[in-house]
Image (tube, rainbow, N blue to C red):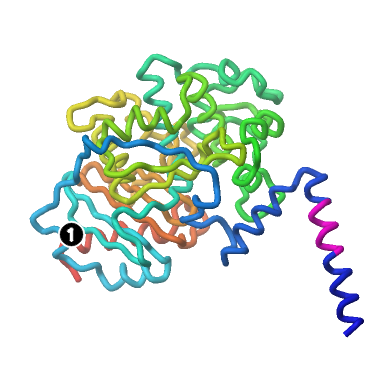
Amino acid sequence: MKKFFKILKYFLLFVVAVVLLLYITGYGYIVKSAKLVYGNGHITAFIDDSRFFNTRKIDNDPSHIWHWPLTKDYNRTKPTTKLLKEHKKMKTVAFLIIKNDSLWSENYYEGYHKDSLSNSFSMAKSITEALLGKAIKDGLLKMDDKVKKYIPQLKGKYADEVRVADVASMSSGSDWIEDYYNPFHITTEAYFCEDLNKLMIDDVRIDSKPGQKFHYLSGDTQLMGMIVAKATGMTLSEYMSKSFWKPMGARKYALWTLDDAGQTEKAFCCVNSNARDFARFGKLYEHFGNWEGNQILDTAYVKKSLSPRLSSSPYYGYSWWLSDYKGKKIAYMRGVLGQYVIIIPEDNLIIVRLGKKRDFIPNGTPHSNDFYIYIDEAYKMLENKK
């Protein structure tokens, strides 16, 4: 027994030494991430983790709620067998099919319901790009502006050259490393860090020529968020409430996760809302920035957003993923755990899926396997093929 306690004592001393070393070397955020993620039975961030972070409220206007109309066939068609299997496999929590701007099918799973908030993850990139578009429409900045106009401390060989359009299209030339599972890389640090603005200024460099090549980097969106906040003089949450949440009649407030200092929104992720309200961005972009007669975003801006910036990456526009699956022009918002708002304008169709897992991405393609399944099975349902 004495030997056991001796071993335990040295083990605990080792753990304390490791923790101290992490804090001394600037990796103290790893302790928080391990406690939050592994302590809650996960291996990465999860869809209801907002309660463990500081958040800022995105206010709606309870006196002005726009309700999705229901079609005469609302929820009359059951999900296909294949779709139900995929929902179970990928732990879907919400699946909506919106046809002709009306709810046609709506199902919730895993104990979630129409008012449940869950993490958007990288769908927030498309939302931040919408905020950028609104700031441009408001005359507060231009797509061709230099980033250093708003973030003069930006570092790197090409920091003087990078433009707003480059960060909006993921072609900044930044040295950011996009890795969700390596705790020592900057993506993890950004998710759990104390001061996100300081991290961006101190640790991000523009070391490659911008505007040349697409690289999916959360850091680009964070820079975009910093630009919008600087140009508007408002937090992203305040500007989103004023520009979108209230004008689009959101049914419920949303929450945007902040850094530990409680000052800065994680622009690259973490808007917490429900499926019906996320779907509003699908409707807005499907109608080229027009919401029920109110032109919130310029039509030309939305068309540009939903078009490839670079010929070498036809699958990505300005913070929106693009596809021509089965000959249909498709654009969508995407989060790391299979969060989707998919728009297919030619069929006036919006598909929303929220959940806890995403299927694999086949080699040589930018789209995950479940993305195709959700589209195929939605069309089968609409054709009433069970």
Residue sitting at x 19%, y 52%: 103
Q: Which residues are magenta?
A: 13-20
In the image, residue 33 sits, relative to residue 43, either above or below, namely: above
Say whether residue 375 is magenta: no
Residue 281 x %, y %: 32, 39
Is 91 or 209 nearer to us in this picture? 91
Which quadrant, please, contains the C terminus?
A: bottom left
Is 87 or 63 nearer to us in this picture? 63
Which quadrant, please, contains the N terminus?
A: bottom right
Q: Does residue 73 appear to the left or right of 272 in the view shown?
A: left
Q: Does residue 80 appear to the left or right of 40 in the view shown?
A: left
Residue sitting at x 36%, y 17%: 138
In the image, residue 11 sits, relative to residue 252, either above or below, namely: below
Q: Does residue 60 appear to the left or right of 27 in the view shown?
A: left
Q: Which residue is mark 1?
A: 382
**Mainly helix, strand or loop, the magenta region?**
helix
Amino acid type assigned to the residue bearing label 1 in the image: Leu
Is 131 or 312 nearer to us in this picture? 131
Most extreme residue toward the bottom is 1
Residue 325 x %, y %: 33, 51
Q: Quadrant of residue 198?
A: top right
10 Å neighbourhood of mark 1: few (<14), some, or many (≥20)?
some
Residue 38 x %, y %: 62, 63
Q: Quadrant of residue 271?
A: top left
Residue sitting at x 43%, y 56%: 338
Which type of secondary structure does the marked residue at label 1 adopt? helix
Q: Does residue 198 appear to the left or right of 237 in the view shown?
A: right
Residue 142 x %, y %: 45, 17
Is 137 or 377 nearer to us in this picture? 137
Say whether residue 18 is magenta: yes
Q: Quadrant of residue 161?
A: top right
Most extreme residue toward the left is 72
